[in-house]
Image (cartoon, helix red, strand yellow):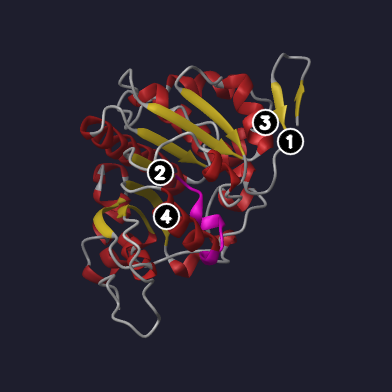
Amino acid sequence: MVRATSAGQIRPDLGEVQETLLIPLYYRACETLREDAIIRDEDAVRIIHGIDYDFSCFDEAKYVYLDCVIRSEIFDERVEHFICNNPNGVILNLGAGLDARFQRVDNGSIRWFDLDFPDVIGVRDQLLPASDRVTHVASSAFDFEWLDALEVSPETPVMVIAEGLFCYCEESQVRELFLKLSQRFQNAHVLFQSISPRYVGRESQVGAVNKTRAKLRWGVRSGQEVLAWKEGWEFVGEWAFIDRHRSRWGRLRWLSLLPWVGRDLREVLKVTEIRLSNSGKPEVGDTQKNTSGVS
């Protein structure tokens, strides 16, 4: 539900997970105002001024700030790469929040679906309206009726993006979603961010997230671990945040040069891209070979 304030702003009434969408929105807006901005998102600046919320509670989380803007940069780059190779493809943006990625990467022909909970879509309809090639879907990503109803042929090249979503979900939910997507599409790429498993259940140690009611529920040492869920899937790549814009990381820049510290920092936050297949091969059981490359 959205209530208008006397100042003409809207006051979003969001669930515990949905509230986290305000964190990357605020950080993208702040970053846009820097002369050396990693990412520029004028829509984020505009939207921040249209929301009645005390964003100052997020101001002290320096590294989460940097995580969010670098994550957005990686997602933009990989989506642009997919669009370059598939100019008439489809993007499914799960947990879309108030992200304006379509406006940043549109090539004039792609079709785009922004999916999120009804309370978020209610806000999005006001601040980032749908258009002839952008469809808003009010649903949980794990209520699969939306996937069955999607007017996209199985042969269409599809990229599914999940930025800052899966860490708030149970592994069983994420696994079922991957399998459903693999069954639904012949050629689907999934681009997702994951956290280290050591932060699961430790929200108090993650700046900005600890200002919300959200719970961290799923993490992996490498996104490649999902390859164990079904044979035939392909690892495309993985990008650690700490390896980018190193001058902005302060002392972590130097600590990451220590092998064991660098390994841990690369595990903490990363973006992974997996290409799914609906070849019908059986799922990999727990006793079969680990294809993830992670021991």
Q: Check disc 3: other Cα within 10 Å, few if <14, some if 14-19, many if 20+.
A: some
Which residue is labeled 2 in the image? 160
Q: Is residue 38 above or below residue 290?
A: above
Image disc number at residue 43? none
Q: Earlier in the sequence, mark 4 or mark 1?
A: 1
Which residue is labeled 3 in the image? 53
For the residues labelled 2 and 3, the Cα–Cα distance comes to 30 Å
Q: Please give the name of the residue rendered at 63% of the width and 43% of the height, measured from the top-left corner.
A: 18
Residue range corresponding to the magenta coloring: 163-172
Q: Which image quadrant is residue 230 in? A: bottom left
Find the residue positioned furthest to the bottom. 287
Q: Position of residue 249 (x, y in %)?
A: 32, 47
Q: Earlier in the sequence, mark 2 or mark 1?
A: 1
For the residues labelled 2 and 4, the Cα–Cα distance comes to 14 Å
Which residue is labeled 4 in the image? 183
Q: Is residue 56 above or below residue 260?
A: above
Q: Is residue 201 above or below residue 11?
A: below
Image disc number at residue 13? 1
Q: Please give the name of the residue rendered at 39% of the width and 35% of the height, measured from the top-left corner.
A: 91
Between tags 3 and 4, which lies in front? 4
Mark 2 and 1 residues: CB-CB less than 8 Å, in contact? no
Q: Please give the name of the residue rendered at 25% of the width and 58% of the height, measured from the top-left corner.
A: 235
Q: Please give the name of the residue rendered at 58% of the width and 34% of the height, measured from the top-left corner.
A: 137
Q: Is residue 147 left or right of residue 7?
A: left
Q: Is residue 89 left or right of residue 96?
A: left
Between tags 4 and 1, which lies in front? 4
Q: Earlier in the sequence, mark 1 or mark 3?
A: 1
Q: Position of residue 84 (x, y in %)?
A: 22, 30
